[in-house]
Image: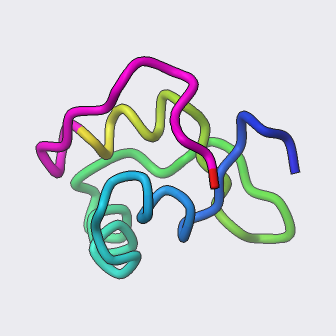
Amino acid sequence: MDKNLMTLGEVAKVLGVKPHRITYALSNGLVEEPALRIANRRVFQADDLDRLAQLFGVELHTPPYPLL
């Protein structure tokens, strides 16, 4: 996968939250769904990560984010 794209699990690790919290926020409209899906899976880009970090009150360091 492209280094600029992240899965739900990778985003959860970067933000330090459980994946189900991100899924809940997306499902209940607390934050916009990521625009991109591959094989019917959410694929997150940097702007999606920024929105989620703001929602969860996480301060991210300057890009590139620590991709795992």
Q: Which of 48 and 66 is in front in this view?
A: 66
The residue lying at 57 percent from left, 25 percent from top is 64
Residue 63: x %, y % from top left: 51, 21
The residue lying at 35 percent from left, 66 percent from top is 22
In the rendered image, which quarter is residue 40 located in?
A: bottom right
Q: Does the magenta stretch include residue 12?
A: no
How is the protein colored in the picture?
rainbow
Check the image and report above or below for 58 versus 41.
Answer: above
Residue 9: x %, y % from top left: 54, 70
The residue lying at 42 percent from left, 53 percent from top is 14
Residue 17: x %, y % from top left: 28, 68
Q: Nearer the viewer, residue 64 or 56?
A: 64
Q: Is residue 60 magenta?
A: yes
Quarter of the rendering occupied by the C terminus: bottom right
In the rendered image, which quarter is residue 12 located in?
A: bottom left
Check the image and report above or below for 49 versus 41.
Answer: above
Q: How many labels does the image show?
A: 0
| Magenta segment | 54-67
Residue 43: x %, y % from top left: 67, 54
What is the chief secondary structure element of the magenta stretch?
A: loop
Q: Residue furthest bottom?
A: 20
Q: In the image, is 48 to the left or to the right of 15?
A: right
In the rendered image, which quarter is residue 16 located in?
A: bottom left
